Amino acid sequence: MTDKLVECVPNISEGRNLAVVAECVNAVASVDGVKVLHFTSDYDHNRSVITFAGSPEGVTEAAVRLCKKASELIDLTKHSGEHPRMGAVDVCPFIAVKNVSADEIVEIAKTAGRRIYEEAGIPVYLYEKASTASHRQNLADVRRGQFEGLPEKTKQPEWQPDFGNGYHETAGITIVGAREFLIAFNIELDTDDVEIAKKIAKTIRFSSGGYPCVKALGLMLHETNTAQVSINFTDYKTTSLYTVVDKVRGEAEKYGTTVKCTELIGLSPMKALIDCAEHYLKIKDFDYNNQVFENHLL
Amino acid sequence: MTDKLVECVPNISEGRNLAVVAECVNAVASVDGVKVLHFTSDYDHNRSVITFAGSPEGVTEAAVRLCKKASELIDLTKHSGEHPRMGAVDVCPFIAVKNVSADEIVEIAKTAGRRIYEEAGIPVYLYEKASTASHRQNLADVRRGQFEGLPEKTKQPEWQPDFGNGYHETAGITIVGAREFLIAFNIELDTDDVEIAKKIAKTIRFSSGGYPCVKALGLMLHETNTAQVSINFTDYKTTSLYTVVDKVRGEAEKYGTTVKCTELIGLSPMKALIDCAEHYLKIKDFDYNNQVFENHLL
């Protein structure tokens, strides 16, 4: 009941040869107590995403085994795909699910990074919350130049790997980090005016002065002729779903429209949703860890 | 991930001798894979409530072991307390938590009832969803007459036990059933007029023509001088928290007041709360089992 629980969502640079993907998934699943929750492959991206969870020790071991296996089976000198990539295991983020502090998840990522170099021989960059310098926080910056750029990149003093030197000849560099659960959430407006969705997106997204840890775009859903605000919550504990939904409701009203419905894409941690129940029901003195039955079973 | 999960909440007729309570809890905990989530004892009631969960087979075995142990340690001929009781293990409800259908939970209760008689020698009445006749659905009716009334009650043809004959001389009869998770939930009004709370309670409770599976009373919280609607949801899947909260908000407005806050007493299943998030956020096509991360871990 007080077990620590960590999620890990590595992206591997193989999305076409599903036998290779299966071997990588099996490497993860071979660790006792680690559960593979989901995996999905994209042909165009030539990339697969594996989602698994377990104890800090279990997920760390599984990440190391995955990097070993992927470096045996994936050769980036022969890899092409739509999605930018730098390593056979390209990114490997760790996410705290239960009873794991912000400091601990960073330590877990660093331990995994060190072991990936020491045991699998793949140099590692640390990113996001595990990053060791501000210019290494953003994944896009770390990955800039991709696999092909590594000979040049790893010569620059500011881009020495955090663990190891240079890069692995065929498996590149793995980018390991700690981040929050990412929630993809869309809000449909009762209008076909995409400009309203774009204005609202601008109001709420952090990069335009809105809420921290919120990314947003205004889009047109052509099939239903509906304007949509498409949102990524990169840390729902910093900015909650209900904060943004309430704001969008208010903004929509200003523009003479309303929120028609919302949509959750993929998974959400239960806490992100239960936080909304607590807010809308106005539950006082709510003790999430103790009062939600399932928290006693996880 | 697709494991069946059942909760069991037996009430035992001992709330003063905590060594006896501990032995009973240990009998439950002795079953592999069964987790004791909570137990609480009440001195005035001379009664304890044990909450545990596990597989159908695990919780059934634990219930049988508990009845054996309680019948060794608890003598109802010497028991007194505020709370009505009929058995050493007085009631033993089973609740489906995950991947268990309404029919299955009834079968689990019946199997447990049969084994409690066959292996522990305690006759059993089945109640609520497991009841075998309409006059046996309501716990209060089944328990009427209490332990002391059993010599008379068990002579009546309509009150023969479902398993066994007569009653155990010192352990009485155990009342075994299947029910939904009970949620205790209070709504505080922004008024000191308890009559408003009483009128609203009457509007929402089933016994006065309100919502099915809702029990409600209007009370005065003297410490804070606040009128409160105190509610039991006996099946949140039939009437949800948000349905009642929204109704109470509307009724409060009619009486010129508002809902100040709400309060959850004890535990709620996560689904009861996430249903509220889905409602208030207006999430379309929400797939509870697959889109809530933790459902993949339970």
Image (cartoon, coloured by chain):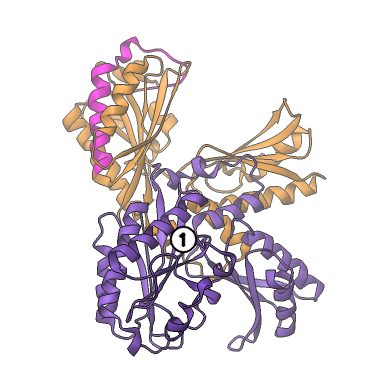
Chain colours: A orange, B purple
* Quadrant position of residue B261: bottom right
* Quarter occupied by the N terminus of chain B: top left
In magenta, the rendered stretch is A58-85
Q: Amino acid at mark 1?
A: Val
Could you say where residue B142 lies in the image, as x and y percent from the top left?
51, 74
Can residue B128 be seen in this snapshot?
Answer: yes
- Front-lying residue, B114 or B72: B114
B92 horizontally vs B17: left or right: right
- Front-lying residue, A155 or A143: A143
Q: Is residue B1 above or below residue B18?
A: above
- Front-lying residue, B96 or A140: B96
Could you say where residue B50 lies in the image, as x and y percent from the top left?
37, 70
A181 horizontally vs A248: left or right: left
* Quadrant position of residue B148: bottom left
**Residue shown at 23%/42% (left/top)?**
A111
Please rate how many residues cluster around mark 1, counting C-alpha atoms within 10 Å: few if below 14, some from 14 to 19, many from 20: many
Magenta segment, principal secondary structure?
A: helix
B110 horizontally vs B201: left or right: left
Label 1 chain ID: A
Can residue B193 be seen in this snapshot?
Answer: no
B127 horizontally vs B7: left or right: right
Is residue A78 located in the magenta-colored stretch of the structure? yes
Question: Circle 1 sits on which residue?
Answer: A292
